[in-house]
Image (cartoon, coloured by chain):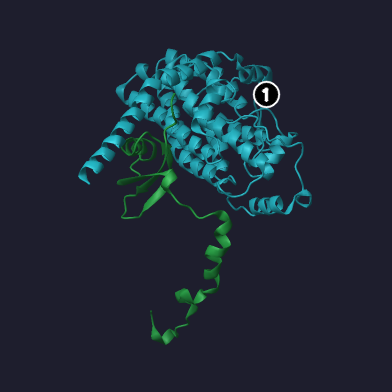
C-alpha cells in the first residue's frame, strides 16, 4: 500500500495474560475500540511501528506528486491542468497531515525528511514507475488512488487518534482524485483509435504495479498479525487486493479495456474474480531501489530540499528580524 | 539548514457560526506564514471563514494521568442534567 511491509519489532503477538498490567490495560482499550492519543502510554513497538507506517505513508504522498507533476505543463486543456494542479496540491496536503500525525509520536519533521532523502525510509513502490502519456495520469487517478482508497478507508478506524483523523480528511479528498482519473480515461476511450490505444497501454503498464501496492500475501506474517491486534491494520493484503480487483474489473469493462491478466476469471462460488500473481521479484527490486524511476524520484526530492534551503533560511531570518524589531519597538514605547 | 520551523496548531471557524475548532498543525517560520500555510493546507475546499494559529509550545495541556482527578468528580453529579428531574406530563413542555 502507501505503506508497504511495515515491520513491528514483534517476534509474535502476546496474549493478554502475558502482558504486564499497563500493557494489558492499553490492549484492552484498543480492543474496546478506544482511540489512543499522543501523550498516553503506549508500547514502544506500537509507537515505532506507527512512526514507520505514518512516515512511509507521508513520504508516499510527497513523492507521489512527482509522476503527476510531470504532466502539469502538458495537460491537454487549461481545465485539465487546473484539475491536475489541484490534485497534486492535495497530495502535498495529505503528506503534511500525515507528517504532523507522525510528529506526535516523537519524531521531528527534519528527521523524517532526512530518512527519506538518505533512502533509509521507504515510500510506495508504485511511484517508481514513469508517466509516459496523458493516459497515465488517468490511470494513476483511477487505479493508484483507487487502490489507496481501499487501504485508507479502513485506516479511518485506526486505533491511533491523530492517524485516524488524518485519514478522515484524506479519504474525503481521495474520491475526487479517483473520479478525475476515470473521467480522463472516459474521455480518451471515446476519442480516436490512437487515444484509446494509449489508454489500453496505460492499463497494461499500471495494472500489475497497482496490485503490488497492497504488498505480498501477509497471512503468515507476524508483523501483520501484530499490526492487526493493535488495530493499525484492519485487513490482510490479499483481502484488500481481492476487493480492489472485484471493484476495478467492471470499470475496465465499462471503458472497453482488456485487463492484462490471462488468468482473470469470474469465480461464481467465491463471488469474486480469480486472478494471476503479480511478479514479486519485480516488486522486491523496486522496493530495494532498483525500479525504473527510483533514482529520479529520490534525486528530485533531494534537489527540492537543497535548492529550497536558502528560501527556508530566508523566511527564518525575516521572522527573526521582525521579532527583534517588535521587541525594540516595545522597548522604545516603554 | 539551520533550524526547523516551529510547530503551530491550527483552528478553523467553519461556515455556520461555529466555534473555531482544532483541525491540525503545521510548521511555519512565523505567525503570518502559519496563517498563509493553514489556508493552503486546511481550507482548500471552503472549510472555513476564519483561521487562528497558536504556537504549539504555548499550549498548556492537561496530562492523560490527570484524567481521573479532573473529570471523575462530575460523574456523580447527574442532577446537572435536565433529564434528572421528572416533570409531570400535565405540566407540558419545559
Instruction: Report which colour depicts chain B.
Output: green
Image point 33% across, 35% down: which residue? B33
As helix, strand or loop, the secondary structure at mark 1 comes to loop
Q: In the visual, does A192 lie left or right of A22? A: left
In the image, residue A5 sits, relative to residue B73, either above or below, namely: above
Q: Residue A2 location in percent, x, y?
A: 56, 30
Q: Position of residue A286 (x, y in %)?
A: 61, 18
Residue A62 image position (x, y, % from top left): 48, 27
Q: Is residue A254 visible?
A: no
Residue at image point 25% right, 43% down: A330
Q: Chain of mark 1?
A: A
**Label 1 sits on residue:** A276
User: In the rendered view of the protein, which quadrant contains the N terminus of chain A?
Assistant: top right
- Say which quarter of the image contains residue A191: top left
In the image, residue A226 above or below residue A134: below
Horizontally, residue A168 falls left or right of residue A226, namely: left
Where is residue A288, by image quadrant? top right
Which residue is farthest left? Answer: A333
Chain with colour cyan in the figure: A
Say left or right for A333 vs A94.
Answer: left
Amino acid at each position: 500500500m502507501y505503506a508497504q511491509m511495515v515491520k513491528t519489532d514483534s517476534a509474535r503477538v502476546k496474549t493478554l495474560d502475558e502482558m504486564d498490567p499497563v500493557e494489558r490495560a492499553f490492549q484492552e482499550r484498543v480492543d474496546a475500540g478506544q482511540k489512543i492519543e499522543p501523550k498516553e502510554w503506549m508500547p514502544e513497538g506500537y509507537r515505532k511501528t506507527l512512526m514507520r507506517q505514518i512516515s512511509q505513508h507521508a513520504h508516499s504522498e510527497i513523492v507521489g506528486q512527482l509522476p503527476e507533476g510531470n504532466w502539469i505543463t502538458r495537460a491537454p486543456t487549461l481545465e485539465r491542468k487546473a484539475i491536475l494542479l489541484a490534485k497534486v496540491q492535495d497530495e502535498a496536503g495529505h503528506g503534511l497531515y500525515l507528517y504532523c500525525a507522525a510528529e506526535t509520536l516523537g519524531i521531528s519533521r527534519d528527521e523524517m525528511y532526512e530518512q527519506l532523502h538518505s533512502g533509509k525510509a521507504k515510500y510506495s513502490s508504485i511511484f517508481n514507475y514513469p508517466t509516459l502519456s496523458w493516459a497515465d495520469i488517468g490511470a494513476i487517478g483511477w487505479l493508484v488512488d483507487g487502490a489507496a482508497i481501499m487501504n485508507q478507508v479502513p485506516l479511518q478506524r485506526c486505533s491511533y487518534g491523530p492517524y485516524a483523523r488524518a485519514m478522515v480528511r484524506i479519504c474525503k479528498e481521495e474520491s475526487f482524485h479517483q473520479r478525475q482519473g476515470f473521467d480522463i480515461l472516459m474521455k480518451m476511450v471515446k476519442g480516436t483509435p490512437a487515444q484509446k490505444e494509449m489508454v489500453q497501454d496505460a492499463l497494461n503498464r499500471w495494472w500489475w504495479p497497482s496490485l503490488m501496492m497492497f504488498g505480498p500475501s501477509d497471512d503468515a506474517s507476524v508483523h501483520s498479525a501484530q499490526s492487526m491486534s493493535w488495530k493499525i491494520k484492519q485487513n490482510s493484503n490479499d483481502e484488500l487486493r481481492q476487493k480492489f480487483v472485484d471493484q476495478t474489473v467492471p470499470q475496465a469493462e465499462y471503458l472497453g479495456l482488456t485487463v492484462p491478466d490471462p488468468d482473470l476469471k469470474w469465480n461464481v462460488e467465491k463471488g469474486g474474480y480469480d486472478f494471476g500473481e503479480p511478479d514479486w521479484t519485480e516488486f522486491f527490486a523496486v522496493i530495494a531501489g532498483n525500479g525504473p524511476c527510483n533514482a529520479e524520484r529520490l534525486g528530485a526530492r533531494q534537489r527540492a530540499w537543497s535548492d529550497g534551503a536558502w528560501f527556508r533560511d530566508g523566511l527564518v531570518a525575516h521572522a527573526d528580524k521582525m521579532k527583534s524589531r517588535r521587541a525594540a519597538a516595545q522597548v522604545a514605547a516603554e | 539548514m539551520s533550524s526547523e520551523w516551529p510547530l503551530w496548531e491550527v483552528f478553523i471557524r467553519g461556515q455556520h457560526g461555529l466555534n473555531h475548532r482544532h483541525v491540525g498543525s503545521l510548521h511555519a517560520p512565523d505567525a503570518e506564514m502559519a496563517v498563509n500555510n493553514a489556508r493552503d493546507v486546511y481550507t482548500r475546499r471552503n472549510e472555513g471563514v476564519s483561521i487562528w494559529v497558536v504556537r504549539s509550545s504555548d499550549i498548556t495541556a492537561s496530562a492523560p494521568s490527570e484524567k481521573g482527578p479532573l473529570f471523575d468528580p462530575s460523574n456523580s453529579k447527574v442532577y446537572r442534567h435536565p433529564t434528572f428531574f421528572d416533570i409531570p406530563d400535565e405540566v407540558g413542555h419545559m
